[in-house]
Amino acid sequence: MEAEGERATFGALLRTLRQARSLTLEGLAEASGVSVRGIGDLERGRRAAPTGGRWRRSRTVWGSPARTAGN
């Protein structure tokens, strides 16, 4: 299934970025507003990427500015 593969790819990328910045699950959770369990689920491919406000907040952790006007 395509969706499962996309979740696994996103999760692997998330874990790689988190580790490259020496962030723990707890540190990323605090910085992004996504729960530790939620991040773990994302990294394992059990959940799709966060959406809406959570995604915008998590993007600031990586140094990517949040867009406005619905992006």
Image: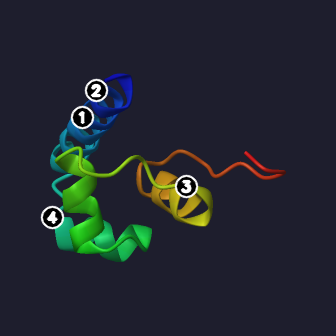
Q: Position of residue 7 (x, y in %)?
A: 32, 37
- Mark 3 / mark 1, whichever is N-terminal: 1
Q: In the rendered structure, are the residues bearing label 2 and label 1 in contact, judged by CB atoms less than 8 Å apart?
A: yes
- Mark 1 / mark 4, whichever is N-terminal: 1
Disc 3 from disc 4: Cα separation: 21 Å
Q: Quadrant of the N terminus?
A: top left
- Mark 2 / mark 4, whichever is N-terminal: 2
Q: Amino acid at mark 4?
A: Thr
Whether 31 is drawn above or below 69: the answer is below
Considering the numbered disc 3 on the image, is that residue within a helix, a strand or a loop?
loop
Whether 34 is drawn above or below 14: the answer is below
Q: Amino acid at mark 2?
A: Gly
**Relative horizontal placement of residue 57, taking residue 1 as reference (left or right):** right
Q: Position of residue 26 (x, y in %)?
A: 20, 73
- Residue drawn at 50 percent across, 52 percent down: 59
Frontmost of labels 3 and 2 is 2
- Mark 3 / mark 4, whichever is N-terminal: 4
Number of marks in the rendered image: 4
Name the residue tied to disc 2. Answer: 5
Frontmost of labels 2 and 4 is 2
Considering the numbered disc 2 on the image, is that residue within a helix, a strand or a loop?
helix
